[in-house]
Amino acid sequence: MGQATQTAFRKAEKKYAQRSQTPDLHNVVDLAAASTRAAGQAVRGIQLTHDLESPATLPFQLFSHKRPPAFVLRDHPGLVLIPNPFTDEAQRWLARKCLCDCPRPPNRTNLTPFFNEPPESMFSLAANAPARSKRIGCRSHEDTLQLGVTLPKDSFYTQDELPSDLLERLRWCTLGQQYNWTTKEYDLGSSPFDTDADALMRAIALAITHPDEASDMPASNGYDGAAFVSEAGIVNYYDERATMAGHVDKTEEKMDAPLISFSIGLSCIYLIGSATRDTEPTALMLRSGDVLAMCGESRMAYHGVPRVFAGTSPEFLSCPAAGDQDKAAEMYPEWHYFARYLSRHRINCNARKCS
Ligand SMILES: O=C(O)CCC(=O)C(=O)O
Ligand SMILES: [Fe+2]
C-alpha cells in the first residue's frame, strides 16, 4: 500500500512499530507518567459503581482496592481503563493461570493443528525436569489439513520439538467457545471457561456498569454488568517483537456486552481508533495489571498492539524468587521459570459474551 493510500490507523501502527529509533511517546496516553498530554486532556475519571470483589474461592485478595481509580477516554466513548487494580500476588496468580492452566487441551492454541499437545501446558512441561527433554510429536500432514489449516512452510512445524522451543512459539490460546481464525467463527466446539477467570471478568463487568449516569458525557457503558458471562476468550502471548495488527472483534453474535481484558508482563502501546481505519487512533501505554473494557461505541472500534517494550516487566514478576511464598505456589512450577518468561513477554487475557 502506497504512502498516499495509507490509512490513519496504519500510519500510527508504523510509527510505533519502528525500531530504528525510540518512538516519540509524546502523544501516548500514559496514566503512570503524568508528564504526557494524557493525564488531563485525554481521560476523565469515573467512579466504579460496585466494589471489585475477589472470588470467594481464592485464598488471597485479587484487588488492592475495592474501588480503584478508573477512567474513560474522552475521544473514545465506552473505552474504560482501570490502571492495575491487582495485588502483586494476584498478578502472579493470573500469570500462572495464563501459562499453566489456559494453554492446554481442550483449549486450543496456535500449536494445536501441528503438534500432539499433551494434557499439560508447554510451560509446565518446559519447567519440569524429566518432561523438558522429551520432544512433542508433530502431527501428520493429513491431520494438520483435517484441522482446517494450511501446511506451514517453516520446517519447525513439521518435526518433533522440545517443550521450551514450542513455548517460544506459543502465540494464543482460546477459552470457552473456541474461535476459528480461518473461518472467523466460533465453530470449533467449546471448553469450560476457567471459573476463577470468569469470576474476575464478571466482577469487572459489574464494577463498570453505568459509570456515566451523573455526567454529561455520552454513556460509556449502559450494559448491565450483572448479565455478563465469559463465553469466549483469548489469551495472547507476545514476545518483545510481537505485534497485533489493527482489527475489530465482531464475530460475537451480540456486541452489546463489553470485551474485557487484563494484561501481565511487559508494557505495550495499545491503539484505539473508531469504526473505520481512517480516524487517527489514540495511543495508550498499557502496563502490567491494567484492565481495559471496550464498551458501547468502542466495542466496534479498530484496535491493535504495534509495540511491546523490552525490559518493562515489574520486579515482582521478573525477580526469580518473587512468587516463592505465594498461596498458589505449591500448585505450580517454581517461580523462577515464570520470572524468566515474564521478563520477556506480555500476556493479554480477554473475555467476551457472545450471545
Ligand atoms: O493484546 C491486547 O491488548 C489486544 C488483544 C486483542 O485485541 C484481541 O485478542 O482481540
Ligand atoms: Fe481485539
Image (spheres, helix red, strand yellow):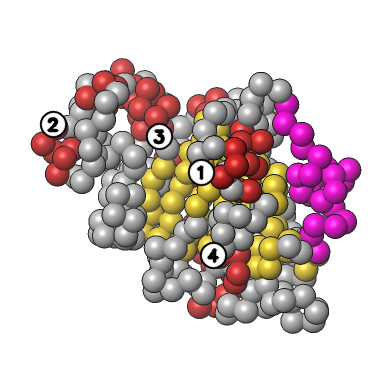
Which kind of residue does numbered mark 3 sit on?
A: Leu
State the extent of the magenta-drawn residues as a range: 22-44
At a point 37% along the width and 22% down the height, the residue shown is 165
At a point 78% along the width and 68% down the height, the residue shown is 46
Q: Please name which of the two marks, 1 or 2, marks the residue nearer to the observer.
A: 1
Residue indicated by mark 1: 245
Disc nearer the start of the sequence (3/1): 3
Inter-mark Cα distance, 4 to 3? 27 Å
Give x and y (percent) for residue 300: 54, 65
Give x and y (percent) for residue 198: 48, 62
At a point 69% along the width and 47% down the height, the residue shown is 283
Inter-mark Cα distance, 2 to 4? 39 Å
User: Residue 115 sits in which quadrant?
Assistant: top left
Query: Which class describes the residues within 10 Å of circle 1: few (<14), some (14-19), or many (20+)?
Result: some
Q: Please name which of the two marks, 4 or 3, marks the residue nearer to the observer.
A: 4
Which kind of residue does numbered mark 2 sit on?
A: Ser
Please, is residue 54 above or below residue 240 in the view?
Answer: below
Instruction: Tell me: 185 left or right of 236.
Output: left
Whether the residues at callouts 4 and 1 have beta carbons within 8 Å, the answer is no
**Count of numbered badges drawn on the protein:** 4
Inter-mark Cα distance, 3 to 1? 17 Å
| Mark 3 C-beta to ligand 1 under 8 Å | no
Query: Which class describes the residues within 10 Å of circle 4: few (<14), some (14-19), or many (20+)?
Result: some
Residue indicated by mark 3: 170
> Secondary structure under badge 1?
strand
